[in-house]
Amino acid sequence: MSLRVAVQMDPIQSIDITGDTSFALALEAQARGHTLFYYEPDRLALVGGRARARMNSLAVKDMRGAHFELGPDKTYWLNEMDVILLRQDPPFDMNYITTTHFLETVRNQTVVVNDPVSVRNAPEKIFVTQFPDLMPETLITRDRAEIEAFRCVHGDIILKPVYGNGGAGIFRVRADDENFGALLDMFSQTSREQIIAQKYMPAVRAGDKRVILVEGEAVGALNRIPADGDARSNVHVGGRPEAIALDARDHEIAAKIGPVLREMGIIFAGIDVIGGLLTEINVTSPTCIREIEAFGGPNIASLIWDAIERRSVNLRGR
């Protein structure tokens, strides 16, 4: 099977190939003989109800400083592609949401990973609340009185924006922290977003575990240890990645959320687990598969492409 694969992503020239999941997926697709195309989200257009994009043919090489070659620009209708990888990074803002509407126009003709309707309807920090029995105590609101009451009950809490990403805007507020009021003022004045208040989990010092799910099954994991003096575990803000195995709790969580993900067309998801509790379900542009493989884990890109190819066969057979 040879597929025409378009990758919708951020500028390819600026990625760090050692840890870029989109690049890993492109490498695997190329190795399987699929034809690659590349475009950035700003190249999308909706014309007469049909979506198209100005694309470049793409060749990739696992070589730092010479990792890609692009062909000349050419405009294609999105339904000319067999597969579209929705891979631009958040923020999950109105621009991001608009691209999902464009991609929705071809979801019954082209395999879009992940399904754009489900991506739009499943913001990582809200979607996870469908599984409250798996989560730490969590509140989402803009009501100051609600947040103050939550803090009175739990004392040591985390505050973060509901559509934040990459560790931005995450604050730990202890019971005696006098910055609490100022932080609420900052959130309310700088954004119209809801605020998440979550009970602080000391277990984060042992790591924030990223578990990768393919078709709802847990297939690999990476632990991320926060730097000293920082509550955030994200690698690009100082968290230290380390190898870790999947455990019974990871599989238990996957067994509960996996059927929902499969039904929604979420082929590839990344969940965050702290102390056995689920904090996020990432479906927009999950990461960490190259790091997992570098620590001796499976080739998750191959597992993802196995799933994509199966879905493509099923779609063609309709």
Image (cartoon, grey):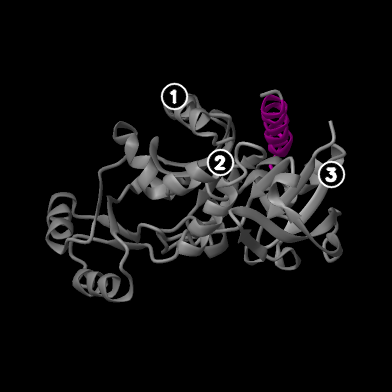
- Left or right: 312 as drawn, with respect to 277: right
Magenta part of the chain: 295-316
For residue 222, above or below residue 230: above
By secondary structure, the bulk of the magenta-drawn segment is best described as helix
For residue 313, above or below residue 66: above
Nearer the observer, disc 2 or disc 3?
Answer: 2
Q: Residue at x 18, y 50 (%)?
A: 154
At label 3, counting other C-alpha atoms closer than 10 Å, the crowd grade (few under 14, some 14-19, many 20 or more) is some
Which element carries disc 2, helix, strand or loop? loop
Q: Residue at x 47, y 58 (%)?
A: 92
Residue 313 seen by the camera: yes
- Left or right: 282 as drawn, with respect to 21: left
Q: Residue at x 74, y 34 (%)?
A: 302
**Residue 276 percent coordinates (x, y):** 40, 35
First in residue order: circle 1 vs circle 3:
3
First in residue order: circle 2 vs circle 3:
3
Q: Amino acid at mark 3?
A: Gln
Which residue is identified by label 3?
Answer: 30
Which element carries disc 3, helix, strand or loop? helix
For residue 192, above or below residue 124: below
Nearer the observer, disc 2 or disc 1?
Answer: 2
Magenta run includes residue 314? yes
For residue 156, above or below residue 262: below
Q: Amino acid at mark 2?
A: Asp
Q: Mark 2 to mark 1: distance in Å?
A: 24 Å
Q: Mark 1 to mark 3: distance in Å?
A: 34 Å
Quarter that holds the C terminus: top right
Asked whether disc 2 touches disc 1, contact meaning CB atoms under 8 Å apart, the reply is no
Which residue is identified by label 1?
Answer: 252
